[in-house]
Amino acid sequence: MRWSPRREHCRLPRRGQTEVTYWIERAAWGKGIATQALALLLELVTARPLYARAASDNAGSLRVLQKCGFQPVGTEKSFAAGRNEDIEETILRLDN
């Protein structure tokens, strides 16, 4: 697994918001690695609320975030460089 600060995957959070982002290599999908890594990160990053985004059609990423306590709070259209198109993203928030 690789936590990627690559420019095309990064989006600045709105002023005053802390946002977690991640990118997982396809070979690591479905093995619980992302959930475990995010849970460990959340032990270190105590800022709340904490925000995250995932493509609305990315059930795996949405499941990882929800397993770690994030709750959907809305959607937004934005450009996804990896897909080279605008997509709908689900915005999630962790309060506790």
Image (cartoon, helix red, strand yellow):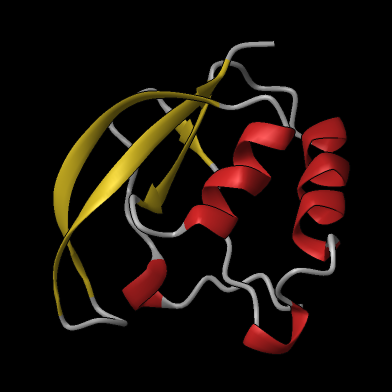
Q: How many marks?
A: 0
Give the residue drawn at x 73%, y 88%.
27
Residue 9, horizontal then vertical, whole percent: 39, 70
Give the residue drawn at x 65%, y 83%.
25
Whether residue 68 sits left or right of residue 71 in the image: it is right
Residue 35, relative to residue 76: is it above or below?
below
Give the residue drawn at x 32%, y 55%.
11
Quadrant the C terminus occupies:
top right
Residue 87, relative to residue 94: is it above or below?
below
Q: Quadrant of residue 26?
A: bottom right
Residue 31, horizontal then vertical, whole percent: 84, 69
Whether residue 27 sits left or right of residue 7 in the image: it is right
Residue 83, relative to residue 32: is it above or below?
below
Residue 30, horizontal then vertical, whole percent: 75, 69
Quadrant the N terminus occupies:
bottom right
Give the residue drawn at x 57%, y 70%.
23
Front residue of 28/45: it is 28
Residue 24, horizontal then vertical, whole percent: 64, 74
Front residue of 36/47: it is 36
Whether residue 91 sits left or right of residue 20 in the image: it is left
Q: Quadrant of residue 63?
A: top right
Would residue 28 be seen by someone viewing this image from the given angle?
yes
Would residue 21 be seen by someone viewing this image from the given angle?
no
Q: Quadrant of residue 33?
A: bottom right
